[in-house]
Image: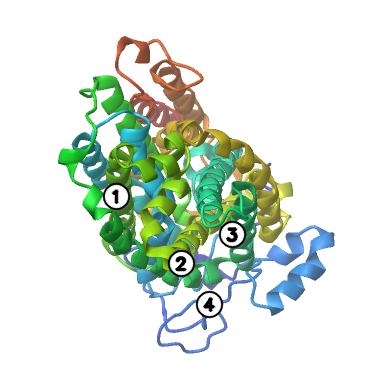
């Protein structure tokens, strides 16, 4: 990849000025006009912002896709790629959508599974699990929430924005890792959704359920950004109905005084569960910028942050805590424990809790299962954006093609992973957490220590030109150094490092993030002094 390998923006002098100053204090764009100059009181994505091929996106695509792209565009399907959006495109005032997309993505059964891991996998009691969940959720949700601000402020997808610290070539590393992370999330959500569907009827099994979840997520993702926001604005409602019903039906069994006794927690189990929960939340930071690239770039940072943070926190803490409570109670309720299948079937536990509601309970279970697509759809969308950011060739393949590829990969892998759910859950989320925490540390250190203000990002001119971006050496070396401490701090089913063996448990997320900040701060200072950018 080189400066001339990817076509840059073709904009007028006026538009270049807008792009250079779009986040500065001196620039106040006319957000009442859409891209074609038509007046709009709302700056709505639905009516006023064209979400289609811009800056020669269509011309860049491989010839075999161009005809299909033109056809899909007529149907309103998003075909825009990773080219940063301009100031005139980032005008959508509906920042509340930033709340709903992340509330819906987290207010679902996977959050239940994450919380239930405290008692079911790490052997913690209810109160210790709840305390850890509350503290970690409050702190960890700040990371993906702040990353979401990069979308409207810069108009860049997450894996394009990271080029401003990793460099044009170095950014391929987190892009590739995010591809694998996306598939990991998809596998976990599909497993839980598939298990829940299988619990509805003996005529269904988890395999068929996984296929249904995968196909449903593909359909939603295929339509793109605009449809995703519309879908997520309403898709949380079934879970909001099911949540109090679950508590009502199972409440009589949620008396901590009747829970089976557990051993006192060890430092290793507490730290490992803390690391696991933090990983499940922080790892969203590589996704959140992708869903604000058409929203109002003039909105205050705190406002965008607050919408996203409140969406993450209210959803995560709700389902995390109810998951811990039901998992802690399950050993004392025969039907729950049978449905739970030794901690490997979240859907079975849900079915057992909802069984007293009869047919209505099964109907709710179907809705809960299908709602896993709330998390799968944006994940599948980011899978495509990450693939396109790896190299110029992949940027020439339309986003919707990668959605199909993602679905084709996740279905067979989810079927295999469903056999040992908790082991799969902890291993996948922990590994994602290791790299994404180090990644977040590097990006935030660059932003607060080096850039310091939004106007310091010369997005329109530099995003695809190696000679205008940092070399990326500092980021790569800091990342490698972070893994130098992460590996000995790991504690997984497949490997336990020497530091973790001393009784610390899995602390890779914490040690890796800390080392990444320190190393990057020093190395980036040296890099900028030598190279000048």
Residue corresponding to mark 2: 359
Task: Kindly check if marks 4 and 3 are in contact, taking CB atoms under 8 A apart as contact.
Answer: no
- Between 241 and 489, the one nearer to me in the picture: 241
Q: Residues within 10 Å of mark 3 (few under 14, many from 20)?
A: many
Q: What secondary structure is found at the residue carrying circle 1?
A: helix
Q: Which numbered disc, 1 or 4, marks the residue that appears first in the sequence?
A: 4
Residue corresponding to mark 1: 322
Residue at image coords 47%, 62%: 362
Residue mark closest to the camera, 3 vs 1: 1
Q: Which numbered disc, 3 or 1, marks the residue that appears first in the sequence?
A: 3
Q: Which numbered disc, 3 or 2, marks the residue that appears first in the sequence?
A: 3
Residue corresponding to mark 4: 49
- Between 210 and 394, the one nearer to me in the picture: 210
Q: Is residue 441 above or below residue 400?
A: above
Q: Is residue 478 left or right of residue 245?
A: right
Residue 84: x and y in percent read 55, 60
**How far is mark 1 from mark 4, CA to CA?**
40 Å
Residue 241 placement: quadrant: bottom left
Q: Is residue 122 above or below residue 281?
A: above
């Amino acid at each position: 990849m080189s400066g001339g390998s990817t076509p840059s923006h073709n904009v007028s002098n006026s538009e270049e000025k807008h792009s250079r100053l779009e986040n500065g204090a001196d620039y106040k764009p006319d957000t009442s006009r859409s891209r074609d100059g038509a007046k709009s009181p709302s700056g709505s994505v639905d009516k006023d912002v064209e979400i289609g091929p811009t800056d020669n996106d269509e011309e860049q695509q491989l010839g075999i896709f161009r005809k299909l792209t033109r056809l899909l565009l007529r149907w309103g399907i998003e075909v825009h790629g990773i080219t940063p959006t301009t100031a005139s495109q980032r005008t959508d005032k509906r920042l509340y959508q930033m709340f709903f997309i992340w509330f819906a993505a987290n207010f679902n059964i996977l959050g239940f599974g994450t919380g239930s891991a405290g008692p079911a996998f790490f052997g913690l009691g209810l109160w210790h699990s709840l305390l850890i969940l509350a503290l970690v959720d409050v702190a960890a949700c700040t990371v993906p929430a702040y990353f979401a601000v990069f979308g409207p402020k810069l108009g860049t997808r997450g894996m394009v924005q990271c080029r401003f610290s990793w460099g044009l070539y170095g950014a391929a590393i987190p892009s590739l890792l995010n591809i694998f992370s996306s598939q990991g999330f998809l596998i976990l959500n599909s497993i839980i959704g598939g298990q829940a569907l299988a619990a509805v009827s003996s005529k269904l099994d988890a395999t068929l359920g996984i296929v249904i979840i995968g196909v449903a997520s593909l359909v939603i993702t295929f339509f793109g950004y605009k449809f995703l926001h519309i879908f997520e604005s309403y898709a949380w409602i079934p879970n909001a109905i099911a949540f109090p019903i679950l508590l009502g039906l199972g409440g009589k069994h949620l008396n901590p005084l009747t829970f089976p006794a557990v051993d006192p927690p060890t430092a290793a189990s507490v730290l490992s569960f803390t690391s696991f929960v933090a990983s499940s939340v922080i790892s969203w930071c590589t996704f959140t910028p992708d869903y604000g690239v058409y929203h109002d770039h003039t909105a205050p940072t705190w406002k965008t942050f607050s919408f996203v943070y409140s969406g993450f926190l209210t959803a995560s803490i709700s389902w995390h805590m109810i998951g811990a409570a039901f998992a802690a109670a399950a050993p004392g309720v025969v039907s729950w424990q049978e449905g739970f299948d030794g901690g490997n079937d979240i859907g079975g536990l849900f079915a057992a809790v909802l069984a007293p509601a009869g047919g209505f309970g099964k109907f709710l279970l179907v809705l809960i299962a299908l709602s896993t697509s709330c998390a799968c759809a944006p994940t599948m969308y980011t899978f495509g954006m990450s693939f396109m950011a790896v190299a110029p060739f992949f940027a020439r393949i339309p986003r919707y093609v990668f959605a199909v590829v993602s679905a084709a990969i996740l279905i067979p892998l989810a079927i295999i992973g469903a056999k040992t759910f908790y082991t799969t859950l902890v291993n996948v989320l922990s590994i994602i957490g290791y790299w994404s925490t180090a990644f977040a540390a590097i990006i935030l250190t660059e932003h607060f220590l080096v850039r310091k203000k939004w106007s310091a990002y010369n997005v329109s001119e530099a995003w695809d030109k190696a000679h205008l971006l940092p070399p990326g050496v500092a980021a790569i070396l800091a990342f490698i150094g972070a893994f130098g401490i992460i590996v000995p701090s790991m504690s997984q089913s497949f490997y336990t490092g020497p530091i973790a063996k001393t009784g610390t448990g899995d602390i890779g997320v914490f040690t890796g993030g800390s080392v990444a900040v320190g190393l990057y701060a020093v190395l980036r200072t040296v890099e900028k002094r030598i190279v000048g950018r």
